[in-house]
Amino acid sequence: MSNLQLDAQGQLRHCLTLEGLPRALLLRILDQSEGFLGVARQAVKKVPLCRGKTVANLFFETSTRTRTTFELAAKRLSADVLTLNIAASSTTKGETLLDTLRNLEAMHVDMFVVRHAESGAAHFIAQHAAPGVSVINAGDGRHAHPTQGLLDMFTIRRHKGDFAPLRVAIVGDILHSRVARSQLAALKTLGVAEVRLVAPRTLLPADPESLGARVCHDLREGVRDVDVVIMLRLQRERMRGALLPSEHEYFQLFGLTEERLATAKPDAIVMHPGPINRGVEMDSQVADGPRSVILEQVSNGIAVRMAVMALCLGTQNQGAAVTAHD
Amino acid sequence: MTETSRLSIRHGRLIDPANGIDGHLDLHLAEGRVLAVGTAPAGFQPDQVLDARGQVVCPGLIDLCARLREPGEEHKGNIASETAAAAAAGITSLCCPPDTWPVIDTPAVAQLITRTAEQAGWARVIPAGALTQGLAGEQLSEMFALRQAGCAVMSQADRPILNTLVLRRALEYAATFGLTVFLRSEDPQLRAQGCAHEGRVATRLGLPGIPEAAETVALARDLALAEQTGARVHLRGISCARALEMLADAHCRGLAVTADVSAHQLILTEDDLEGFNSQCHLYPPLRTLTDRDALRDAVRAGLINAVCSDHQPHEADAKLAPFPSTAPGMAALETLLPLMLRLVAQGVLDLPAAIARLTSAPAAILGLPLGNLASGQMADVCVFDPEAQWRIGPETWRSQGHNTPFRGDLLIGRVTWTLLGGRIVHALRSPS
């Protein structure tokens, strides 16, 4: 998959998954993101890196948060942004997707940011995109959400520095989570000491150990001595699909409370991709507590997405210069 | 197509597993039937001679499962296009599942298919009659009438019967008339929205999985009912090792169920889904290397009797979408023999055994006097060059469906001549 993502010079052309991306490239994205953090603090929150470029946000699945951060990231890079909310049903046919793509290409779009309910959708679009057009995966089915994974890594690095000694727990609906898969891929590449997946068996995929993690069914054990706790969002429809008996029981067993968090390292941070179901995944005390970095993740998300867009559009070198100057 | 009444195939390696023949013997055909093997009868003067030096001569291949898409989905293929592909692949008889539109649940539809196939003249088409009306799993179809109309077997295609009592009654009713029932064991609820084997690769790619248990849970039910009813049951498309253990156990208890596997299940694995390769979106799903190797062992041991193509041609758009949205299945008639020869080259089974899985065994499952070259038998013959190398391309591919993951591969083994009832229906070389 990395061949599709990288050009002949090993530069990022598409960002579809973090799996297979070299460590040096991940670190480069994180480094560049540091530079872009400052843009938000400027009086004029813009850099001219992608002036003249057109970015189309193709959201086949509804999303407010991710769509907004991508839109903002593109605008802060001075790109022209087109946002399309394309209602997608499970019966949406490939030709519709390709037709959409071809029409937008005819408008000379430089980048597609794609959110789709099916795994592999961004990959499919990248395979069929015209030369010179980049694709960023903004979440495809259960497969990947690479920029979310990167912003999580960025957040972890800002708090913890070195990845090597870290123990990280990912808690919740691993089965359906594209975020968890991207986090896992990045954490492995960045060489963390240990990743634990904490969930009931109904929310774990088959062969979870093949993802390179240790599996725990007990939250206390799962977060014991960890440096980072990543809580995942639980979709409410899971209660209806015989995956869980109730929100109440889920919270009793897997909800993060101050008491359970006490088994983690004293300086452990708590993350969540949002939006939070308070009282289901975690209680408000934790969500709003001193160890929560959840809102920081949102801010970091814009900087990281700016870095990824700049890299894919080949403007990163200018980016380094501009941000250094800023 | 060449009309001829007397023909000799000379100097080839004749392999006829049904009659235990493997040797350099000539084959003489007259009036659409096999006249003699070896020495020609005195005074026999062929109109045509096929020089099969360096070639293998065997009964025409019999495919237990090939979708022709007609009636109902002619944009994917039709009887003429797909039987022409069958002829090019050495397949002289093929069984089409009843999931056409309309479903093959009335004699009229069955007759439409056989008549259209006869008119096309490329291959013998044996429709499988629907076990239940509309394949809905509720009301039994008129199985006797369907048999009268040419349906050699009854089948539910890939639409399992949810109501176990209906399945029991269907098997009992079929057994009344000695009809063989093709079942593809699957629990649809356990399959859910799955599109790939539930395992390591689907986990990593985030594809909804189809657990092995979707097959084994249903297989347990199907075997229990086969035993209970005494119906002749043929299990289609076995895909996992655990199912083979259950099948072996059933055989140990004396149950006479037969089974088949698709040729590509003996070659590909879940790893071939890498990069969301929609050409490998298949049903049943490609499973693990362990499963594939167990399937190979079962084919070698004869636990799996027959190998079929499970041909499912699609229009190009059907595979142009994100993986879960693509249509499962591959166009597979023309790769059936080369894939079996690949197994022979890899030492999985010897050539006569491979040919048996494609000829005598499927004929026995269908209960038809096909798949052998004894005197008086139908002159359905496949002559192929076991060394010929080829790649899939416009000049080598006949199916209307181009959906195959083997495009670009070097395929070894190519059919030189196919004879249907003594007529040459495919010729790469001119007869002398």
Image (cartoon, coloured by chain):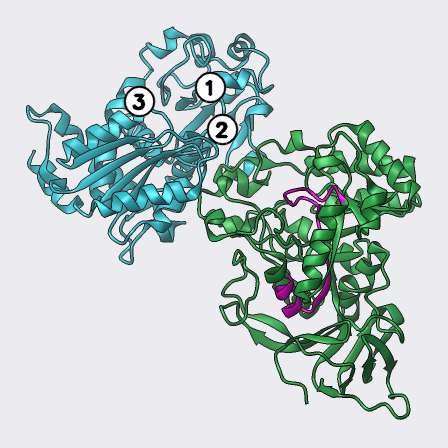
Chain colours: A cyan, B green
Horizontal relation, residue B51 to residue A19: left or right? right
Labels in figure, total:
3
Identify the residue under disc 3. A64
What amino acid type is highlighted by mark number 3?
Answer: Thr
- Percent across and percent down for residue B215 are 71, 38
Helix, strand or loop at mark 1: loop
Identify the residue under disc 1. A235
The answer to which of marks 3 and 1 sits earlier in the sequence is 3
Res B184 → quadrant: top right
Magenta region, residue range: B83-106
Identify the residue under disc 2. A176
Sort mark 3 into few (<14), some (14-19) or many (20+) by Cα contacts within 10 Å: few
Horizontal relation, residue B344 to residue A240: left or right? right
Q: Residue at x 83, y 54 (%)?
A: B365
What amino acid type is highlighted by mark number 1?
Answer: Gln
Q: Could you tell me which chain the residue with mark 3 belongs to?
A: A
- Percent across and percent down for residue B427 are 64, 78
Sort mark 2 into few (<14), some (14-19) or many (20+) by Cα contacts within 10 Å: many
Q: Could you tell me which chain the residue with mark 2 belongs to?
A: A
Helix, strand or loop at mark 3: loop
Q: Are marks 1 and 2 in contact (CB under 8 Å)?
A: yes
- For the residues labelled 3 and 2, the Cα–Cα distance comes to 19 Å
Helix, strand or loop at mark 2: loop
Horizontal relation, residue A120 to residue B371: left or right? left
